[in-house]
Image (tube, rainbow, N blue to C red):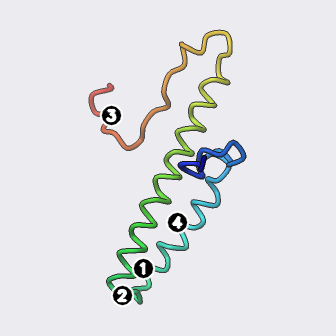
């Protein structure tokens, strides 16, 4: 029976392992788009690819955060607390 998705293969690297590659590709794509030499169809394609790369990077960062949480206290992993989210408004935290 054929596989539904190549991402389900046990030999595929984790999102954390591919973070640098995805980030480099995203930076190169953004630089290419900022030059302004792409047509509409190319721009839309590049944007779509950029969103995919961004999501890959986010998934890698989330996986890394989970790994750090688990490593922080092996005796009581349930006591792990999320890292502060710099993108949220903290005005109500004080």
- Is 39 above or below relative to 73? below
Placement of 82 over or under 76, stated as above or below: below
Whether label 3 touches label 4, CB < 8 Å: no
Can you identify the residue that label 3 sits on? 90
Whichever of callouts 3 and 4 sits on the residue coming sooner in the sequence is 4
Q: Disc 2 to disc 3, how far (Cα)?
A: 41 Å
User: Residue 47 is drawn in which quadrant?
Assistant: bottom left
Residue sticking out furthest to the right: 11
Q: Is disc 3 placed on a helix, strand or loop?
A: loop
Q: Residues within 10 Å of mark 4 (few under 14, many from 20)?
A: many
Q: Secondary structure at mark 1?
A: helix
**Residue nearer the viewer, 49 or 2:** 2
Which mark's residue is nearer the viewer, 4 or 1?
A: 4
State yes or no: discs 2 and 1 in contact (Cβ < 8 Å): no
Disc on res. 34: 1
Q: CA distance from mark 3 to mark 1?
A: 32 Å
Q: Residue at x 50, y 60 (%)?
A: 53
Residues under labels 4 and 1: Cα distance?
Answer: 12 Å
Residue 80 location, quadrant: top right
Specify whether 43 is left or right of 76: left
Q: Position of residue 60 (x, y in %)?
A: 57, 45
Residue matched to label 2: 39
Of marks 4 and 2, the one in the foreground: 2
x 30%, y 38%: residue: 89
Foreground disc of the pair 2, 1: 2
Residue 16, image x, y percentages: 63, 45
Label 4 vs 2, first from the N-terminus? 4
Q: Is tag 4's residue or tag 1's residue first in the polypeptide sequence?
A: 4
Residue holding disc 4: 26
Q: Element type at marker 2?
A: loop
Q: Residues within 10 Å of mark 1 (few under 14, many from 20)?
A: few
- Of badges 2 and 3, the one in the foreground is 2
């Amino acid at each position: 029976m054929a596989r539904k998705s190549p991402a389900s293969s046990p030999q595929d690297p984790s999102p954390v392992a591919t973070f640098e590659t995805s980030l480099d590709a995203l930076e190169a794509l953004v630089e290419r788009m900022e030059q302004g030499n792409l047509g509409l169809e190319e721009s839309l394609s590049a944007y779509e690819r950029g969103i995919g790369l961004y999501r890959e990077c986010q998934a890698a960062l989330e996986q890394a955060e989970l790994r750090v949480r688990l490593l922080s206290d092996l005796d009581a992993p349930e006591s792990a607390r999320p890292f502060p989210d710099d993108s949220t408004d903290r005005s109500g935290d004080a």
